[in-house]
Amino acid sequence: SAYTAKEGAGMTLGRGVVNVAFGLLIAKLSVPVVRNLFSKKQVMNGSFDPLRLVNTYGAFGVVDGVREELIVSSAVGRENDALEWREYRFPVKPGDINRRPRWVSPYHYRLDWQMWIA
């Protein structure tokens, strides 16, 4: 059968109704998530409904004043000589606090990121 404008309009209206209903459901379920966002004791990586449709995600639940950082280094020299240890520098790992922060896009330096949060 041929596709008519009337059939197309009916499908569009039905899809619009479903989209609005789904949007309202997500908005209603998101209220506890937004309350959690503004609370003093946030729940990180938690779900607020039994179907787990909305949840919170937090990579950094607590940020302390002290930052411990892994430093990767290797020995340079021969076995019988005095060994000199050299630090590996990563392009975007924080490292030196006096160095200007790096802006790297569109690449994601995965190893640097993992070293920073390890």
Image: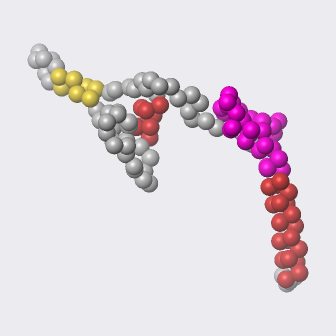
Q: Position of residue 114 (x, y in %)?
A: 45, 34
Specify whether residue 14 is painted magenta. no
Residue nearest the viewer, comparing 65 with 16: 65
Instruction: Point out the stretch of residues depicted in magenta.
Output: 25-53
Compared across the picture, whether 10 is left or right of 48 comes to right
Compared across the picture, whether 61 is left or right of 23 comes to left
Residue shown at the point (44%, 23%) measured from the top left: 66
State the image quarter where residue 75 is shown: top left
Residue nearest the viewer, comparing 69 with 73: 69
Compared across the picture, whether 101 is left or right of 84 comes to right
Q: Is residue 44 visible?
A: yes
Farthest top residue in view: 80
- Considering only vertical position in the picture, is 44 above or below 14? above
Residue shown at the point (59%, 30%) measured from the top left: 61
The quadrant of the rendering that contains the N terminus is bottom right
Specify whether residue 40 is painted magenta. yes
Q: Position of residue 17 (x, y in %)?
A: 86, 63
State the image quarter where residue 54 is shown: top right
The colour scheme used to paint the residues is secondary structure
Residue shown at the point (88%, 74%) measured from the top left: 10
Q: Position of residue 31 (x, y in %)?
A: 78, 43
Q: Position of residue 110 (x, y in %)?
A: 44, 40
